[in-house]
Image (cartoon, rainbow, N blue to C red):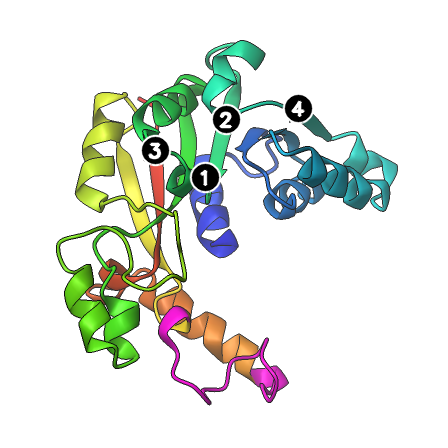
């Protein structure tokens, strides 16, 4: 996903431009730190106090120049208008957040308002068009049947997590003036890898497996029909 995001940033903004980035629901701060190291000014909006403490601890280990480029704000992603003025950011990230929100449209609308003209919105969501894939590829036929017609997996692997359909989010983004520019699949194969498959971050994985795994996932994530059945979707909208 980081490679996909970088591809969109490089293709949209002049080389060397320091971007204003808002990371809503920044989690461990992986993307925030990565983009700050690349020279961008990053604001993270996070409501979980333990997560904020972990991010600040990670920041403490960074050089001063990088620490100065990251600001952490405690708050809910649905309240962006409380903390920031409209059009304040060139890039807005919201990764792995919509799946935990019952009504995502107000959140997405708030994110779109934060974008400056031609700004980039990056959403990472659970794929509501592929809930049967995990069960089916693992031979759980009952679970796969139960998953058809829903946006939630039949097993308990994502209990309480909702999903979004590509067509629905495409319509939402168009209505908000930040139409979908491109989209990718994320975790096309790895979520459904059969037992014993070589995956680099599991016991028995070989060091060279990671490079091959990333190459396969990156290719599949931009190729039909594979990207359409990925566990996650990475949607990139652009403010008109």
* Residue at the (40%, 74%) spot, across then down: 216
Q: Are marks 3 and 1 in contact (CB under 8 Å)?
A: no
Which residue in the structure is indicated by mark 1?
Answer: 97
The mark nearer the N terminus, 3 or 1, is: 1
Q: Which residue is mark 2?
A: 77
Give the spatial CA distance, label 1 vs label 2: 9 Å
Q: Is residue 173 left or right of residue 67?
A: left
Other-residue count near label 2 (Cα within 10 Å), few / some / many at <14 / 14–19 / ≥20: many
- Which residue is located at x 64 percent, y 31 percent? 42
Image location of residue 190, percent across then percent down: 42, 72
- Residue 102's label in the rendered image is 3
Residue 70 percent across, percent down from the top left: 71, 31
The tag on residue 73 is 4
Going by the image, does 146 lie left or right of 236?
A: left
In space, the residues marked 1 and 4 are separated at their CA atoms by: 16 Å
Q: Nearer the viewer, mark 3 or mark 2?
A: 3
Find the magenta span and give its range: 191-208
> Pointer 4 and pointer 3: residues touching (CB < 8 Å)?
no
Would residue 83 be seen by someone viewing this image from the given angle?
Answer: yes
């Amino acid at each position: 996903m980081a490679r996909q995001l970088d591809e969109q940033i490089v293709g949209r903004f002049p080389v060397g431009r320091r971007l204003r980035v808002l990371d809503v629901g920044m989690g461990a701060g992986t993307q925030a730190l990565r983009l700050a190291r690349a020279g961008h000014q990053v604001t993270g909006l996070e409501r979980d106090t333990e997560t904020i403490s972990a991010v600040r601890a990670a920041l403490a280990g960074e050089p001063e120049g990088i620490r100065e480029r990251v600001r952490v704000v405690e708050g809910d992603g649905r309240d962006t208008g409380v903390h920031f003025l409209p059009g304040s950011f060139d890039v807005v990230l919201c990764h792995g957040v919509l799946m935990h929100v019952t009504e995502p449209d107000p959140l997405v609308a708030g994110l779109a308002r934060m974008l400056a003209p031609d700004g980039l919105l990056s959403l990472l969501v659970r794929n509501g068009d592929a809930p049967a894939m995990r069960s089916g590829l693992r031979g759980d036929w009952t679970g796969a049947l139960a998953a058809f017609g829903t946006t939630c997996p039949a097993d308990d692997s994502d209990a309480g997590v909702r999903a979004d359909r590509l067509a629905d989010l495409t319509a939402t983004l168009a209505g908000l003036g930040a139409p979908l520019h491109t989209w990718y699949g994320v975790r096309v194969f790895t979520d459904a890898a059969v037992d014993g498959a070589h995956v680099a971050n599991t016991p028995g994985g070989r060091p060279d497996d990671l490079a091959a795994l990333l190459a396969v996932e990156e290719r599949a994530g931009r190729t039909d029909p594979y990207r359409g059945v990925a566990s996650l979707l990475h949607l990139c909208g652009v403010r008109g």
